[in-house]
Amino acid sequence: MSYEEWGPLKGLIGTWEGDQGIDVSFHNDKGKIAETPFREKTTFKPFGPVDNGDQCLYGLDYRTAAWREGEDNPFHTEVGYWMWDASTKQVMRCFMIPRASTLIAGATVEADATKFTLESELGSPTYGILSNKFLDEIARCTRYDVTITLGDDTFSYDETSVIEHRKITDVILHTDRNTLKRTSWEA
């Protein structure tokens, strides 16, 4: 199958693993910003078409988990969808993390793109961010962006969440980045 209907998302299909991840975030136990190296596994399973009135979407059901070095239980997981709307050239990423936060990021992207950036902003009615009450009061995410770079059997991401944290007077730029290698075309 060629997966041309998935546009720029076709290069993500499969199972991926990478052990070069770096998470830069506020560490509550240390009371400061610190780095955490991690390994990660992500799967992207194609589905579609999804007809939504006149809109036709092709998507990837995705799941990801990240482990700190030397740990058996993941410190971060996500579930969600990546969607492609060819008629408007929109790539969308919808996901939830188990801190009761959810996000939709998106951008206009060409069908053959191998590098693109998706964005989300607190308060946006389309590409926005929602959090539970606790996080909204303690560590509010106000902006998110992720840049994806696709290679033959690699993909890299570099993402930033802008956090207004009550324990710090300045905003925190919580960043994550990794390069993953395809281990299978099957998800």
Image (tube, rainbow, N blue to C red):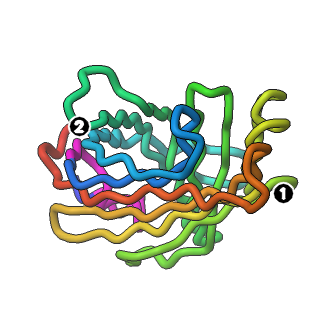
Upstream in the sequence, badge 2 or badge 1?
2
Residue 143 in percent (x, y) is at: 71, 60
Please tell me whether the stretch drawn in magenta is mainly helix, strand or loop. Answer: helix
What's the amino acid at mark 1? Answer: Ser
Q: What label does residue 69 carry, if any? A: 2
Q: Nearer the viewer, mark 2 or mark 1?
A: 2
Q: Which residues are magenta?
A: 3-17
Residue pointed to by mark 1: 124
Label 2: state its secondary structure.
loop
- Asked which quadrant contains residue 181, the reply is bottom left
Decide which of 129, 134 is in the foreground and name it.
134
Pick out the residue farthest to the left: 183
Residue 59 in percent (x, y) is at: 47, 47
138 vs 113: above or below = above
The crowding category of the residue bearing disc 1, from other C-alpha atoms within 10 Å (few below 14, some 14 to 19, many at least 20), is: few
What's the amino acid at mark 2? Answer: Glu
Verify whether residue 184 appears in magenta: no
Q: Disc 2 versus disc 1: distance between alpha carbons?
A: 36 Å
Quarter holding the C terminus is top left
Question: On the picture, is 32 further left or further right than 165?
Answer: left
- Asked which quadrant contains residue 105, the reply is bottom right
- Mark 2 and mark 1 residues within 8 Å of each other at the beta carbon: no
Question: On the picture, is 16 further left or further right than 78?
Answer: left
Q: Residue at x 35, y 75 (%)?
A: 114
